[in-house]
Image (cartoon, rainbow, N blue to C red):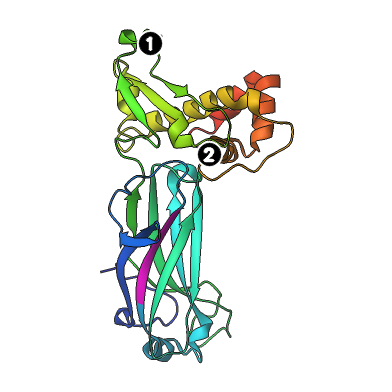
Amino acid sequence: MPAARFMPYETPDAESVQWDAWWFVRGGVREALPQQLPGWDYSSVETIGVTVHLDTEAIKSATGMQSARDLELVLIADCAPLGRRFVGAASIDEEAEETVDLSVEIPAGEAALQLEVSAHLVLASPGEPGSGRPHLAGSRLLSSQRRTVQLEGEASRFPSEAVPFSAIGLEPAPWTISASFADLNDSFMGSIRLLMNEEHPLARAALDPVANPEAAERLKIDVFRMLVAVVAPDIPECAEQYEEASVGEVVTNMADLYLRQTLVEAASMYRENPLRFERLCYSAVNE
């Protein structure tokens, strides 16, 4: 049950809004939302939601609202490691009892490590101040419990292999990538493989991002740096639209996430001013 919150205005009874089980959608199929999202990778577009049951008459009576359309349901997904917030909203009809599927979409390449999700009943439009009733748009009337969803566990965001680098003739770095693609529209998951050096302590730490978030963030930045190094020779002077889940689309999303630049701009900076490229990449760590 959500913790009690004291508001400077009248709020509905908690029983007038029931927050049902949380869920996520994959391939058009709705499943219960687990503690760790299965199969998540950097190219994933995720939809997370909760089903809400409302007694609109009780809500209007408690708040003094004339119409349920003055209210709105809002779902917030916060990604604290990257400082991102994603918001979904749903309107409320005048039916005495209503069930609403409330959801939010998490775009590809814009979240990492974990999400904290919560749902809220809020005032949709401003009202008249005074009389102890809510009047500011966005005022929260009731809120669900918060849910924390892990995006990354021991698995990587794309195919990986932990191997001793000494056994395969590689320098003793913590990690590297193996890239094999003919075109930037080739599948990212089928073209890129992350090699983790099981002999290196930093690699072992990065495999547990919950316990070692700094190492996991360093891994993501290094993977981005290596991907730009690999794709830079193939980047045209003009921006292109790449196919969904392709090498080009994933690296484009990463360039926007870490540098707030297009892939064309990032590749150009990598070629022409590599030291600035390095500084900007590492300035994005735990930003």
Viewer-closest of 107 and 70 = 107
Can you give x and y, in whole percent of width and height, for residue 166 in the image? Answer: 32, 8
Q: Which residue lies under the disc numbered 1?
A: 172
Q: Amino acid at mark 2?
A: Ser
Q: Circle 2 sits in a helix, a strand or a loop, which is it?
A: loop
Task: State the image coordinates of residue 218 (x, y, percent, origin top left).
Answer: 44, 28
Above or below, comparing residue 62 to residue 2 in the picture:
below
In the picture, measured across the screen, residue 61 lies left or right of residue 232, that is left
Which residue is more in the foreground, 94 or 178? 178
Magenta range is 46-52
Q: Is residue 128 above or below residue 265?
A: below
Residue 124 x/y as whole percent? 54, 77
Q: Which mark is residue 246?
A: 2
- Does residue 157 sit above or below 30 in this rendering? above
Please state which of the two labelled residues, at mark 2 or mark 1, is closer to the viewer: 2
- Residue type at tag 1: Pro
The front one of 283 and 192 is: 192
Q: Position of residue 55 (x, y in %)?
A: 36, 86
Q: Which residue occupies 62% across, 40% down?
A: 260
Q: Residue furthest front?
A: 182
The residue drawn where x is 33% and y is 83% is 16
**Is residue 50 one of those drawn in magenta?**
yes
Instruction: Report the residue at 48% width, 24% height from top.
Output: 179
Is 36 placed above or below 15 here? above
